[in-house]
Image: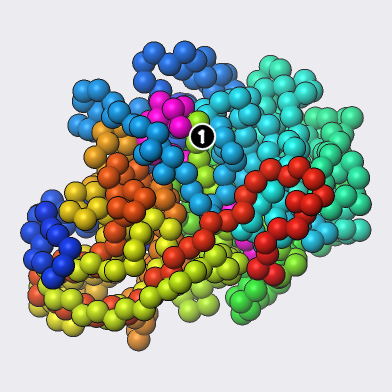
Amino acid sequence: MASSESLLPVTSQHDPLSESSSNSIPETRRGKPIHLVVYSGFLLIALYITLIVTHTRPVRTKGANDEKTAASRARLAGVSEKSNDHIWKISDDREGEAFAWNNTMLSWQRTAFHFQPEKNWMNDPDGPLFYKGWYHFFYQYNPNAAVWGDIVWGHAVSKDLIHWLHLPFAMVPDQWYDANGVWTGSATFLDDGSIVMLYTGSTDKFVQVQNLAYPEDPNDPLLLKWTKFSGNPVLEPPPGIGDKDFRDPTTAWKTSDGKWRITIGSKINRTGISLVYDTVDFKTYEKHDILLHHVPNTGMWECVDFYPVSKTKHHGLDTSVNGPDVRHIVKASMDDTRIDHFAIGTYYDSNGTWVPDNPSIDVGISTGLRYDYGKFYASKTFYDQHKGRRILWGWIGESDSEAADVQKGWSSVQAIPRTVVLDKKTRKNLIQWPVKEIESLRLRSKKFHKKIGPGTVVPVDVGPADQIDIEADCETSGGATLRGALGPFGFSILADQSLSEQTLVYFYVTKGKDSKLKTFFCTDTSKSTMANDVVKPVYGSFVPVLKGEKLTMRILVDHSIVEGFGQGGRTCITSRVYPTKAIYGATKLFLFNNAIDATVTASFKVWQMNSAFIHPYSSVDDLVVPSST
């Protein structure tokens, strides 16, 4: 659960109906244990400063042929510039010439078991579903370059959410109502088991409209061909809503009177809102006068998601489920900050409204809850009726320069799909965890039980450490009650032998003003690379630790992406890292304890991870793929 003491900047709030425009955001060696120099800046950063990297695209260096064209197209379309330019302006690293990447370094960055296309740009997940034995994943894709633009719907299928076959594009911008892009959408299963897909199209005039599509052949398990409704668009921006502020329809859910209901993100001046529509046939709609929800000074809401979670059971719920044992989640992706915020609350079917349990951590408020406190955006859940679970997808953008993306020929990955349930112990946050199927990639493993004293770092002998899965629990003794702080302690991953490059994933325990201990889960990428054209933040947030619980973490390392899960998934942090030396066989793993006078005992297991089977579909023979089911 987030709080005002989390490692996140607090922004001021002002009149939601003001006419102001949207603002763009926010040496050691292996061997025997060695003493660390505890530099003061590290602790200050760990406790008080988290540089929140917005989930946007870095600008291309001057001289790129289509930089101005791409930026202009983004502005015309009504989406944020895919740029980290404001980050570079406050970074000393970008002084001088950009880093000279070579193909060896860039090739290493490509992931082994995270979903990504063979080449080019990818962003939002679209309409994920399970149908006739196959998981389907659709996504925003540029078939022509490694930068945003020319958006179509990519399409892939899997038997287990891990091994994927790339299929032909599901939908392309071939009509006036989606001429400038087939944008984000969601799938809904009707009562007879058929599928409808609602998606946003950017018209030939750059107006955002909602369109209907459905499978051409419902008997085709691969859903290879899609038909667009002849009466599209089915929804246009209503009065008072900007032409470029009306996008990303949700999965529909059933109302008590048998109608279907959807919500769509928008804004009124600086107030983020979620519009509500009812329909019986997905072709004609009735707009509610009342909003599902709105929050002042949060800007444009995009990729809104709405779904139920059980208060008593550990499995997922279909989107239409409601009742006394159900809470509802409203999540919105903040276009201004490129952060996914959610809140837990109560949904009222009678008028289509939702009220948060705790308004002080409402959707989009800087101290509110997030799925992920790192690089994670435009997320979307779906109900997996095959295994009775709700699964979360999230787009993980790059933190390097756009020029480097163009050089390597691709940009962005998807996070490992996660199951999502309400935390039954706290009832104040969600639990996210990588889908069970990822464990099918585990190869050989090693168990460790290490006790490390204050100010030490020890190597962990696992061989190359760029494709690993770590599960650990830690106990401490001394330090915290005497000095008021304990740690940081955790793992140094993707490190070279001299630790000149390393990424730290760790806990930090501090004593608050009320003398109670508060635990933070963090990832520090500030020393992750020698390159100067990479954003290298420290991410972190408060994580609830209940009485009697050990400190636990899980870390998935897959080349240039690191996913961390603190306390069983109460707090999650995803980061992108781009080492120049700690690559291939030179990647090392270390365990460190930077406390002043506390000893840490860590029990953990490390698995080497196999690569996933992800390739283009070419024949019926490809329908037989490795599966963990």
Of the pair 399 and 366, the residue shown nearer to us: 399
Residue 615's x, y, as percent? 65, 46
- Which image quarter holds the C terminus? bottom right
Indicate how the structure is coloured in the image.
rainbow
Query: Which residue does the image show at 49% across and 19% down from the upper left?
Result: 71
Query: Which residue does the image show at 88% across and 50% down from the upper left?
Result: 220
Asked if residue 180 lies left or right of residue 514, the reply is right
Q: Does residue 82 lie above or below 46 as drawn?
A: above
Q: Quadrant of residue 22?
A: top left
Q: Does residue 92 lie above or below 526 as drawn?
A: above
Q: Which residue is mark 1?
A: 410
Amino acid under disc 1: Trp
Q: Does residue 439 lie above or below 499 as drawn?
A: below
Residue 422's x, y, as percent? 55, 70
Residue 593's x, y, as percent? 19, 69
Number of dots carrying numbers: 1
Q: Quadrant of residue 198?
A: top right
Asked if residue 18 lies left or right of residue 224, the reply is left
Considering every residue shown, the one lying at the far bottom of the view is 548
Q: Residues within 10 Å of mark 1 (few under 14, many from 20)?
A: many
Of the pair 265 and 496, the residue shown nearer to us: 496
Region in magenta: 390-408
Res 620 visible: yes
Query: Which residue does the image show at 87% across and 58% down from the upper left?
Result: 193
Secondary structure of the residue carrying tag 1 is: strand
Asked if residue 585 lies left or right of residue 220, the reply is left
Q: Quadrant of residue 452?
A: bottom left
Asked if residue 461 lies left or right of residue 305, the reply is left
